[in-house]
Image (cartoon, rainbow, N blue to C red):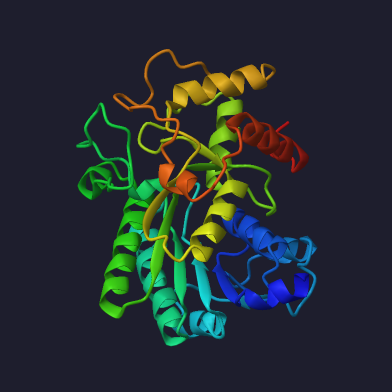
Amino acid sequence: MASHREKEKPAVCVTGANGFIGSWLVKTLLEEGYPTIHASVFPGSDASHLFSLPGGGDEDRLRIFPADLLDADAMSAAVSGCSGVFHVASPCTLEDPRDPEAELLSPAVQGTINVLRAALTSQVKRVVLTSSISAMVPNPSWPPNKPFDESSWTDLDYCKSRQKWYPVSKTLAERAAWEFSQEHGIEVVAIHPATCLGPLLQPNLNASCAVLLQLLQGSKDSQEYHWLGAVHVGDVAKAQVLLFETPEASGRYLCTNGIFQFRDFAERVSKLFPQFPVHRFTDETQPGLKESKDAAKRLIDLGLVFTPIEDAVRETVDSLIAKGFLV
């Protein structure tokens, strides 16, 4: 039966396949029996951890394609022969960019266009775009007594005036994707993960797990502009596959296990790990943020069940310790 089922699943391409979310997505696709996965990775970056995933050592199933998002030919080669594309790759720096246009904006926007153009040429049936809550917030004009939902878009002028370039890059890239989709009739569905937690499959520290690491080390950063909540990275990967496999899924999907203050998150972390100097915030960290337990209602309605935040935090901390990021 398994081989019969595997034959029904199409070949798919994952961009940014060796990053935090990308690695978990590859892991999930392998577990779900996808027979052919084209893993697109930035040239020269380490993808060796993907081979140690169950099924990842099979060269017929997992094929690595070194491809810069800005290299249209390389992206075409990675996507060729696939019926689905998961576009996860997007530049993200732990440090502030010196040249936002070159480091973040152009690769995010033009890279997304290159992926979609390659998908169009290869007659891909559906593209699952990994956007971010950074394309939804900050949005200061959002009504204070209303929980954020998929209709919210990040205020670009607000971000630019505060030199917050990552939200600008994610917003412009998503808008470009919808525009391209409408013009060319290619099927796109977008997922918007909140702060992703969970075990690191990749060797390097990623930006979202760094938020928890810094909190454990005593950081007083309230994440004012960038926070809606948190989600286990495994749930994000499951949601991406769910959106690919559900023909009626369309539009934007917020992916977070609830909306809540960063202050409350810090308190939970402090209770779980009292041995670390976690700062306890007394005031609201996200002024006016309306809490919501089922903020990801669109995904919940499709059948996604979220991992408890406490489990996600524990697993992340164990992983940060095991990899030597946290002592």
Count of labels in the image: 0
Q: Can residue 99 be seen in this view?
A: no
To which quarter of the image does residue 285 belong?
Answer: top left
**Is 35 placed above or below 73 here?**
above
- Nearest the viewer among 72 and 241 is 241
Q: Is residue 34 left or right of residue 68?
A: right
Q: Can residue 16 be seen in this view?
A: yes
- x%, y% of residue 281? 46, 17
- x%, y% of residue 24? 64, 55
| The C terminus: image quadrant | top right
| The N terminus: image quadrant | bottom right
* Residue under the image location 62 percent in, 77 percent down: 65
- x%, y% of residue 183? 26, 77
* Residue under the image location 35 percent in, 57 percent down: 169
- Nearest the viewer among 43 and 40 is 40
To which quarter of the image does residue 38 belong?
Answer: bottom right
**Is 156 placed above or below 86 here?**
above
* Residue under the image location 56 percent in, 85 percent down: 81
* Residue under the image location 62 percent in, 17 percent down: 271
- Which residue is the extreme one toward the front? 1
Q: In this view, does 176 lie to the left or right of 16?
A: left
- Nearest the viewer among 122 and 196 is 122
**Is 121 placed above or below 268 here?**
below
- x%, y% of residue 244? 51, 64
**Is 231 placed above or below 237 here?**
above
